[in-house]
Image (tube, coloured by chain):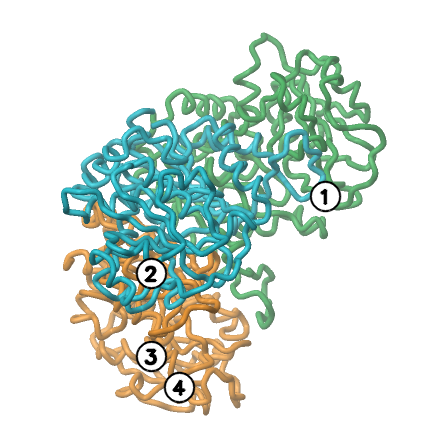
Chain colours: A green, B cyan, C orange
Amino acid sequence: MKQFLSAHDVFDIDALVATGLAYKADRFRDKGLGAGRRIGLLFLNPSLRTRLSTQVAAQHLGMEAIVFNVGAEGWALEFADGAVMNGSTVEHVKDAAPILGQYFDILALRTFPSLQDRAADYSERTLNAFVRYSGIPVVSLESATLHPLQSLTDVLTITETFKEQRKPRVVLTWAPHVKPLPQCVANSFAQWMTAWGAADFVVTHPEGYALKEEFITGATLTSSQDEALEGADYVYVKNWSAYEDYGKMPPASGNWMLTLDKLKATNNAGVMHCLPVRRNVELSDEVLDSPHSLVTQQAANRVWAAQAVLSEILKQA
Amino acid sequence: MKQFLSAHDVFDIDALVATGLAYKADRFRDKGLGAGRRIGLLFLNPSLRTRLSTQVAAQHLGMEAIVFNVGAEGWALEFADGAVMNGSTVEHVKDAAPILGQYFDILALRTFPSLQDRAADYSERTLNAFVRYSGIPVVSLESATLHPLQSLTDVLTITETFKEQRKPRVVLTWAPHVKPLPQCVANSFAQWMTAWGAADFVVTHPEGYALKEEFITGATLTSSQDEALEGADYVYVKNWSAYEDYGKMPPASGNWMLTLDKLKATNNAGVMHCLPVRRNVELSDEVLDSPHSLVTQQAANRVWAAQAVLSEILKQA
Amino acid sequence: MKQFLSAHDVFDIDALVATGLAYKADRFRDKGLGAGRRIGLLFLNPSLRTRLSTQVAAQHLGMEAIVFNVGAEGWALEFADGAVMNGSTVEHVKDAAPILGQYFDILALRTFPSLQDRAADYSERTLNAFVRYSGIPVVSLESATLHPLQSLTDVLTITETFKEQRKPRVVLTWAPHVKPLPQCVANSFAQWMTAWGAADFVVTHPEGYALKEEFITGATLTSSQDEALEGADYVYVKNWSAYEDYGKMPPASGNWMLTLDKLKATNNAGVMHCLPVRRNVELSDEVLDSPHSLVTQQAANRVWAAQAVLSEILKQA
């Protein structure tokens, strides 16, 4: 693997999941692989699970990890070609990224969308600029529109828990929230489910919350959450703001918060969420505190997903 | 040791002090003990000495340490059961703590009191929630009401410096400050002195500054600093705000700042303070810059106290 | 080397450069040198390149590095002797620095000038207080008036790229900026060029921007940028605010931004800048994106300069 920005960078998702699960069984099996190699974790936006799990994964491989929180520590980057930099930006990504490429062997980067300018967000300007100018493998720690490490974790968690000889029915359902969130996790999960191809994948959301076409091609779409849940093996719960009326929160009719009562129609489904979760807004206490919940296992699996990705990049480099 | 939240978690204080002093004599004597183990240092409130000394102690034991400053990096936790999280809190401790329990072998945590709500502070809600939900050993890096790593350091420093065949007279004296401070250091020092039992322990403070009953049982109390200092071997200087009129600073009559003149009544006492110290407010320059002062030695000893605690937990895990 | 605060701490600049270049050829040649040793990187002001390159250098030597960002994490130090600390400062450097000296083997420190009070800035009060009170070797990561690690990098970059059997002509030219910057990089570069003695060194700047006398003794001075550039082998571009009318930005007549057209008069000069650079304000895109530019190589060389300095200190300690 030369980079890890989306499902398209992965040749064989099942093989990558198997690598992750092998690390879960024996975390130090490749403990010398990263010796003398260094990963930079650059956070243009804050992170808890992603930062910690990636640092832990790097340690398991014997790599040095250096964290750089730019949100807190301040770094106003310029992205426009030809800009006369007499305003608030202090450094052009053209100048900054190549240096990081000299200091590190792998650059991992988190950045968020503006949720104001859809074209800019979906162009993945920030991520792509670091890919273009750093000259080293880049790993997305969540970008403006995708969250591939989360999605790999999700596929790994489904693979690990599903024991039947058939395709699982996996439902992605929109959930309420108090503020507009990116579409990243939903886009990415849909992209991975489709690329993986080993599940019957259903997406359900209120009117106005359709995801971008390219991510849901091949998925079954329904505006009825009840219909979607029927026979589900996994229910992935996630809020996202509108793609169409970009970044807005059109009113959703009906009650979209998942409850134990709704889960009765499922095949004793496992409930997934990428965390953090707003309890009793996105998901009820009764579901999160029930045996249905996979959220802690899923978050713990972030380490093995990250370790699989880093190891594949190290092996190629 | 399964956790380190107060003196009550320590079976034998003298043995723990001896372990710390053994590390002071040979810091790398257990350098392989923490191999492949990881400690998370979670700062809900900022820290200098505690953070650095604990990181250093972990390194001496060959552990990986990952620091997470939440104050700066933002993480509004919910603690109330059943809360409908449609407000400012973004994650419930029930969901956050178990993940940290998956990423780390030991979780060390700093949190401060509000100084507004005494019952809430003294319930140690934050610390206890992480103990309850993380599922791994928790080490207090100072909590709402106690600071056990500081107190262990203090006992170690007294043990290291007292050379006579009798009990030392140890005085905890209140000192002035410009803003209300927690009672943690004072509560904790009193708790450890009593649990240790190897000193004659005296507490002195102005009216209105009595510590909570449970911490001073067994101590000699006096409102006369002069009387307290008579024959003292150690004088521990510390400001705290009122426990009774909680978090307030009732006016203190008389001059409570320690001076060289006041020290004449002591047995050439060593002067202790946990730092940071407001010079010429809490303690005069003349005392801090005199041979009486143990403050640098005491702060340096933080490393050995932390190393003793981490090693005891590692040996049990 | 006992400390690294300026060119005056270096006995033989060429030997130090050779050490750096040897590390560039084989970064792990001294990978055991720092085993069991620890460097504290204390940032009273923020940093990207300096922080990362020093951390990387420490890792190459097998040292532990602990970063402490004080700007973000808050630490208002008192420097005045005898201060009654009833105001906003919370700790005296007399008390703080000795503790850092106990926790670390080397202390590296970044601090910025106020640009308000010239006498205070040029006294290097902050840096000198840590030198005085920490009791361990101190490395400047840029101080109020100098930036020696940058200058060592600059000499190393010139040494590495100059292939002729004569002295190179090296020009330091002032450049425009949108806000007042410290004189550190310019002062320090001038100091190192003079101490090195292996270049013909020319300084050019608009009226009002003369550097402090002690740094430019031995340099050729001219207010004509055109004259300075004539036959130059290296052009070091840097903005600084006025030393005379301290911290101000007197209007500069003429166009001081370097262009390809201006470079025609040079000996196909390499263009240097310490970064970050304001494109099309300090330096034009056409120069930065041309083969003249050495800025990425120069920034990458920060690692080898830092590694040379740390190794010299470790060998002496």
Residue at image position (37%, 64%) is B257
Mark found first going from the N terminus, 4 or 2: 2
Q: Are marks 4 and 2 in contact (CB under 8 Å)?
A: no
Assign a secondary structure to mark 2: helix
Q: Residue C224 vs residue B159: left or right?
A: right
**C271 relative to B73, above or below:** below
Amino acid type of the residue tagged 2 in the rendering: Ala
Q: Are marks 1 and 2 in contact (CB under 8 Å)?
A: no
Residue at which label 3 appears: C123
Q: Is residue A218 visible?
A: yes
| Dot 2: chain letter | C
Q: Is residue A133 visible?
A: no
Per the model, the C-alpha gap separating discs 1 and 2 is 45 Å
Assign a secondary structure to mark 1: loop
Report whether mark 3 lies on the same chain as mark 2: yes
Amino acid type of the residue tagged 4 in the rendering: Thr
| Quadrant in which residue A244 is drawn | top right
Assign a secondary structure to mark 3: loop
Report whether mark 1 lies on the same chain as mark 2: no
**C107 relative to B199, above or below:** below
Mark found first going from the N terminus, 3 or 2: 2
Per the model, the C-alpha gap separating discs 3 and 4 is 26 Å
Residue at which label 2 appears: C96
Dot in front, 1 or 3: 3
